[in-house]
Image (spheres, rainbow, N blue to C red):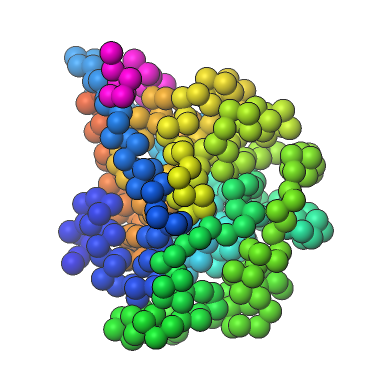
Amino acid sequence: MRLADCHNFHDFRRMARRRLPGPIFDYIDGAADDEVTLRRNTAAFDDCDLVPRVLRGVGAVDMSVTVMGQKLAMPVYCSPTALQRLFHHQGERAVAAAAGKFGTMFGVSSLGTVSLEEARRISNGPQVYQFYFHKDRGLNRAMMERARDAGVQVMMLTVDSITGGNRERDKRTGFAIPFRLNLAGITQFAIKPRWAIEHFTHERFRLPQLDAHVDMGGGTMSISRYFTEMLDPSMTWDDVAAMVRDWGGQFCLKGIMSVEDAKRAVEIGCTGIVLSNHGGRQLDGSRTGFDQLAEIVDAVGDRIDVMMDGGVQRGTHVLKALSLGAKAVGLGRYYLFPLAAAGQAGVERALELMRIEIERDMKLMGCTSVDQLGRDGLRFRSRAG
């Protein structure tokens, strides 16, 4: 299968599956428990229909948006995700370069495999640092200071991962970082030698943001132990308020799902929230960001920038979220599978396809700018009279 033969999310997923050893593919593809929320994230968009307008003069389309003070050329961004060089040796370098080419925002995770500083040198576009709250308050302050020195524009604190989700696919193969594979997992690596050759002929796999705390060679700490031993489940709103004050700039909470929490984020001075269930990887059976979007936008959308992620696979999905009031939409697996399949070229093709879809779908909706999208262009089947 060639990259040129990939025309949508499912094509990229199939190409990634052919290239990746099974345990790594399942790490990207899988979710918590019975994966109900994973499936619902995309299915939620199917319950909403678009109502197009015609004869509106749509010769030119402006799909740019401004979110958390950042101007994006398109209303989607590459959500920060962990361990990207495990999927392809280029990792975050590929994503940063592709995002920069398309004029959109990207992010580096605390568990990223390229440093904040290197990512900043690759792309001059808006950069997010997605981080976790640690028991060591000094480490939290040091991470924010490093991000400030690197020129990061937006801090994004993940608030739905105070402990790891129950990802049973990983348990079946023994997938862990550092690798602790069982026989079934080892066998799947053996039948995909191309991945191993590329992985082991490039520089050592590491976590530059946490080198002193998590070791990929089996030394100090595994990823699972990082979640259970270093992250602080006692984190409170007061802790986050102090971080917002210390940062003094654009500060976003990722993982907000209730109106009450959205209001609290406004009260402590956050400038953005991402409605997210972590791609279904944390609490299975939780609501989707899209399902929660309207009520949260109605409650706080005039005081804080509301974004959402989860299950986004099409330009029409993006238009539906924007029509409900989202300022921008985060992509995760949508760019991770292309990254795994073909590195930077894959991410660029995925973003180009999304750009084309959004532009075409806006024209078909009779809209020349994002602010013309609204709820009058939507109908929910379950709410039809």
Q: Residue 260 appears at what percent x and percent y?
A: 63, 29
Q: Position of residue 337 (x, y in %)?
A: 35, 60
**From the viewer's perspective, is residue 288 above or below residue 338?**
above
Query: Which part of the image, by quadrant, shows the N terminus?
Result: bottom left
| Image point (50%, 45%), residue name | 277
Q: Residue 302's spot in the image, x, y percent?
A: 58, 20
Tell me: 370 left or right of 222: left
Q: Was residue 375 drawn as part of the magenta stretch in this picture?
A: yes
Residue at image point 28% right, 17% down: 384
Confirm whether residue 19 shows in the render.
yes
Residue at point 40%, 60% (across, down): 30
Residue 181 on image: x %, y %: 46, 81
Answer above or below: position of 319 versus 51: below
Give whichever of 68, 313 is nearer the camera. Answer: 313
Residue 316 relative to residue 115: left or right? left
Q: Quadrant of residue 247?
A: top right
Task: Please tell me which residue lies in front, 236 or 81.
Answer: 236
Left or right: 222 as drawn, with respect to 200: right
Q: Is residue 92 above or below residue 47?
A: below
Residue 377 is covered by the magenta coloring: yes
- Res 131 quadrant in image: bottom right
- Number of numbered markers: 0
- Looking at the image, can residue 149 be seen? no
Where's the C terminus, which quadrant?
top left
Q: Nearer the viewer, residue 355 or 244?
A: 244
The residue positioned farthest toward the right in the image shown: 138
In the displayed structure, 229 sits above or below 155; it is below
Q: Which residues are magenta?
A: 369-385
Could you say which quadrant of the image residue 63 lies in? Answer: top left
- Look at 78% across and 44% down and name the residue there: 239
